[in-house]
Amino acid sequence: MSWHCHGTNYAELVSNLQKRGILTSPEAASAMSKVDRKLFVPPTALPYNDSPQVIGFGATISAPHMHSYCLSLLADYLKPGMSVLDVGSGSGYLTAVLGLMVGETGRTVGVEHIPELVDRSIDAIKQTPAGSLMDMGRLEVILADGKLGYKEGAPYNAIHVGAAAAVLPAALVEQLKPGGRMVIPVGTMAQDLVIVDKLLDGTIKKKIEIGVRYVPLI
């Protein structure tokens, strides 16, 4: 998928994502506009291009249109006071946006297995308005195996997974709150972005949204 929503600056990038009908949630757009992508990529990267950017250690930050697409799918589960888990949090960019959406009364947990990215993402988040959530203990980035989630913070209203799992991780499904939603890329060579809804009675419903290409969940 290529949406070509590049901007000459960050505000133009966010505006183009909205104009193309990808970033459909006003709340997500507001939160995204407060977290400059430039802070989360290397100095040599192209932060306002609508394309993935390499952030080191075999990891990338997803293209803005994919972040926007996932935020739009999860927006109803990211209201103030709700709880969200960001698996494979990487650069920390989306973790910061998610944190601003659930706010001071919510809880945001990023899980990343590369120590250097954990440290770097914390430093970057602290340079944004989401840094105050970190100071309050409402947002944290944990060094852990993403496939196992973070049981201590469960259950979650929303779970975003930023890397492709070969199969749907049982631990993440278990940590999803009844009435909650997970968005996760699933597959190896051929991948699909899958919406996983846990109904109030605990029943799991899965829907394939679009074909995607993500780095593997390691």
Image (tube, rainbow, N blue to C red):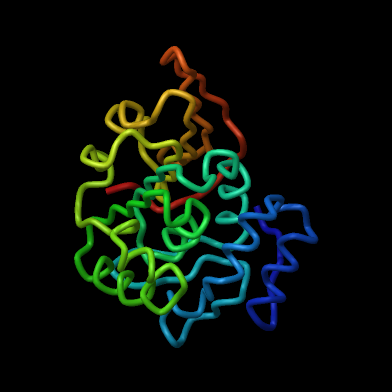
| Residue at figure coordinates x 33%, y 33% from the top left | 155
* Relative depth, front residue between 107 and 61: 107
Disc count in the image? 0
Quadrant of the rendered image containing residue 120: bottom left
Q: Is residue 187 left or right of residue 71?
A: left
Residue 142 x, y percent position in the rendering: 23, 56
* Relative depth, front residue between 59 and 36: 36
* Relative depth, front residue between 138 and 6: 138
* Relative depth, front residue between 159 and 129: 129
Name the residue at the bottom extreme.
43
| Residue at figure coordinates x 34%, y 56% from the top left | 138
Query: Vertical placement of 127 versus 30: above or below?
Result: below
Residue 4 x, y percent position in the rendering: 71, 65
Q: Is residue 42 left or right of residue 18?
A: left
Quadrant of the rendered image containing residue 188: top left
Residue 104 x, y percent position in the rendering: 43, 57
| Residue at figure coordinates x 40%, y 43% from the top left | 83
Name the residue at the right extreme.
19
Residue 80 x, y percent position in the rendering: 51, 48
Quadrant of the rendered image containing residue 168: top left
| Residue at figure coordinates x 62%, y 50% from the top left | 69
